[in-house]
Image (cartoon, rainbow, N blue to C red):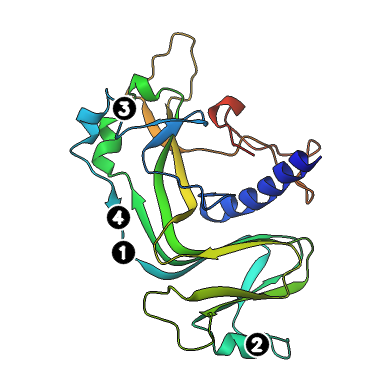
Amino acid sequence: MDFIHRKLSSRKYVDPLKDSCSKWANWDPPKIMHVGDSGEFIHEGNVYTHPDLVPIAHDHPVQPTAEDDLLLIKSAYARRIEQAVGVQGTAVLATAAVSIQVQFTKRRGAFLVKHKARMSHLPDDLLNRLRANSILKDKCLVSEVFFCRGYAQYLSNRNNYIVMLALDNKAGGAPTSGGVNLVWNAQGAQGYLRHSYNEKPVFSPLYGLKVFRSSCPVRREDFELTAANGEWMDVGVPWDDLNENGVEDVDTDVRRKRMPANWLKIEE
């Protein structure tokens, strides 16, 4: 039963954030994802270490982006608010190095906060050279990963309430420039909350997945997927629309156009 609960919880967290940003939220951020990882999708390798792909990837190193101080990803029925008047804990937020308030409205939801985040991604030239490569056939490819020093992930258990997060110095003084002494504090959290902070960007709470698929609308048994008739596409979730309990809604009138389940295997 505990396994089933974890499985449904991870789906409820991943699914709405995927709808919001087209990226995959990592249910276990301390478990590092690496740009170029590939598989179906139990990790099978990396384009930068595979002996047959190293000659191609060697000239196209991973590209980093500039660091963002704070990034918030939230589900559709969650909204960021500047100040919740009269709510206990707002004084703490006012003195924090970083503070954020999220209100859940008509439905349950989720959000992810990343502090000192930087994205690394595969360069377009490499993706072009890997088009229709037989080694990556039917494989998901991690095209980008967001690394950060601090993260806070939250999955609500009901609607119509506010969660407040503050990132401040452990001793209560001014935060250090390196962020070594920073710690998360939360007010109003009633669902699943997980957070951590480190002086280095050791967490990967968000990543992108792509797969090379045919762009031809006609499927034939003898159709050969080539670089000319295919393209890199974002990987869709391997489940249909979920109800608020995280169970697939089999009665929905419009079912998701999803990939075959074997195109993506998520470790629960």
Which amino acid does the dot numbered 4 rest on? Pro
Neighbours of disc 3 within 10 Å: few (<14), some (14-19), many (20+): few
Instruction: Where is residue 165? Give x, y as percent.
Output: 61, 75
Count the labels in the image.
4
Neighbours of disc 1 within 10 Å: few (<14), some (14-19), many (20+): few
Q: Which residue is mark 4?
A: 64
User: Quick one: which residue is furthest to the top in this view?
Assistant: 222
Instruction: Give the Cα distance between marks 3 and 2.
Output: 51 Å
Secondary structure type for disc 4: strand
Ranked by sequence position, the earlier of labels 3 and 2 is: 3
Residue 181 versus residue 58 in the image, above or below: below
Which one is in front in this view, the residue at disc 3 or the one at disc 4? 3
Neighbours of disc 2 within 10 Å: few (<14), some (14-19), many (20+): some
Q: Which residue is mark 2?
A: 90
User: Quick one: which residue is furthest to the left in this view?
Assistant: 59
Ranked by sequence position, the earlier of labels 2 and 4 is: 4
Task: Evaluate if marks 3 and 4 touch, with contact meaning CB atoms under 8 Å apart.
Answer: no
Q: Which residue is mark 1?
A: 66
Q: Which mark is residue 50?
A: 3
Image quarter in which the N terminus is found: top right
- In the image, 137 versus 93, the foreground residue is 93
Which amino acid does the dot numbered 3 rest on? His
Which one is in front in this view, the residue at disc 3 or the one at disc 2? 3
